[in-house]
Image: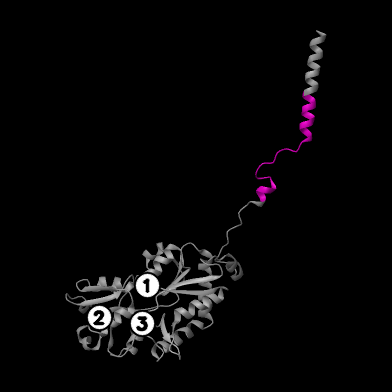
Amino acid sequence: MKKTVKILSLVLSLVMMFSLAACGEKAPQTPAESPAAENSEEPAEIDFSTASLDEIKAAITTVVPGKLTMGTSPDFAPYEFYAIDKDGNPSLAGFDIALAQYIADYLGLELEIIPMDFDGIINELMAGNVDIGMAGISPKPERATAMDFSDVYYEGKQCFVTVKDKADEFKTIEDLNKAGLSIAAQNGSIQLDLANQFSADADVVSLVKVTDIIAELVSGKLDGAYVETIVAESYAKNYPQLHVAMEVPYEEAEGNVVGVQKGNAALLAGVNMALKAAADDGSFAQFIEDANALAQGETYLGLLEDKEG
């Protein structure tokens, strides 16, 4: 009996010793309590609608760090086109080009412009190869899968253009929809949508560049074309045989936007802030005036070939 009591006393002593030792150790921390967990918390998302310019600039990421890479189609005067300097060298000009430079400067980035076909801009934005696209882009709903839209920065109109020798053939919108007519519009553009809508019975021709359309018109290979009004008026001043026949209604997506790489919220916010600044300080109005003057002057390159004939 005494032996049993001694064994029980020994067991109780050992239990008490282990308990006291355990009390002297620090209790394990839960993930929420540990310093590592506190340091690994994700930073709060920025509300770009209320963020400052400095916060937006710090959050912007681009295809090439420090650069704003823009795709454009330089055949759309006075938006973007080639001009010749006093030494005969071609250079990019237009109010989209000037506005893009303003946006880059505003955001503290270096502008890099990559000329391409119009539909290539949409493809390059979708592929993530350029940061923005500017080429008189309208915010068509189907383009929203390829890019994010900035605020509208210019309200454009659409028209039908022909040559003066055929001016009497196109007096009403119904005149644009006749079998046997050859009607052109730029590939991938809203003007092509208009051609398919209003000239469904005609032979609708899709061409890559507006300069190609103008060349085909003045050479007599086309009966007419759908072109943005300010662009058609610009070409008409350089090619006297052209005639702006009528405005064409288009209500689906009026205005022009900057196409921004999909999901780049910081860049989109920065672009919108820059667009507002350019409008407020009068810069954009000056860009339009300068581009129109250049497009109508002797320095206008037009079709990258001799304009006469």
Q: Is residue 236 left or right of residue 30?
A: left
Q: Residue at x 81, y 12 (%)?
A: 5
Is residue 253 visible from the viewing direction of this image? Answer: no
How far across and how far down the image is residue 228, in percent? 34, 79
Amino acid type, callout 1: Phe
In reply to whether residue 20 is colored magenta, the answer given is yes
Whether the residues at callouts 2 and 1 have beta carbons within 8 Å, the answer is no
Which of the pair 7/211 is nearer the observer? Answer: 211
Q: Where does label 2 land, which residue?
A: 224
Instruction: Give the Cα distance between marks 2 and 3.
Output: 15 Å
Q: Which residues are magenta?
A: 15-38
**Crowd rating for badge 1 (residues with CA inside 10 Å; few <14, some 14–19, many 20+):** many
Amino acid type, callout 3: Val
Which of the pair 46/205 is nearer the observer? Answer: 205
Q: Where does label 1 land, which residue?
A: 118
Quadrant housing residue 200: bottom left
Which of the pair 143/62 is nearer the observer? Answer: 62
Instruction: Give the Cα distance between marks 1 and 3.
Output: 15 Å
